[in-house]
Image: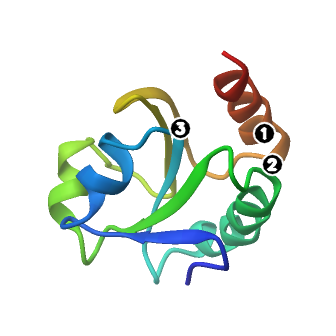
Amino acid sequence: MAGPGVLELTDDNFDTEVIKSDKPVLVDFWAEWCMPCRMLAPTIDELAKDFAGKVKIGKVDTDSNRETAVKFGISAIPTVILFKNGQVVHKFVGVSPKKDFAAKLDQVVAG
């Protein structure tokens, strides 16, 4: 369900793509059956275009990648976590407007 420029993140590649990334990473924890997750998907795709080259954007299917979901305490989806230098910088729970994500991403990219 990921659009162009959105990484499919898994239990196997999460450390390499997110924790060890030299760029900030916005990770959308979602599931196929989750209607709010589907509502958020176009926003995530737009952010991937808007921040291409500055921030990595990825999605974790929580049904297929339970280990990663449990590790980050995902109890409600959609949950979107912003990582920088392998650390959680911000956590959004539920559907948030694009401007909220963009503001946090701009902050992290700038500083």
Q: Tell me the CA gap for discs 2 and 1.
A: 6 Å
Does 36 sit left or right of 33 as displayed?
right
Labels 3 & 2 near each other (Cβ < 8 A): no
> Residue 72 occupies which quadrant of the picture?
top left
Amino acid under disc 1: Ala
Q: Tell me the CA gap for discs 1 and 3.
A: 13 Å
Q: Tell me the CA gap for discs 3 and 2.
A: 17 Å
Residue drawn 53% across and 38% down?
A: 24
Labels 2 & 1 near each other (Cβ < 8 A): yes
> x%, y% of residue 20?
31, 42
* SS under mark 1: helix
Q: Which residue is mark 1?
A: 102
Residue 78's label in the rendered image is none
Q: Nearer the viewer, residue 43 or 56?
A: 56
Quick one: quadrant of the C terminus?
Answer: top right
Does 18 sit left or right of 41 as displayed?
left
Amino acid under disc 3: Pro
Q: Which residue is mark 2?
A: 98
Residue drawn 45% across and 57% down?
A: 77
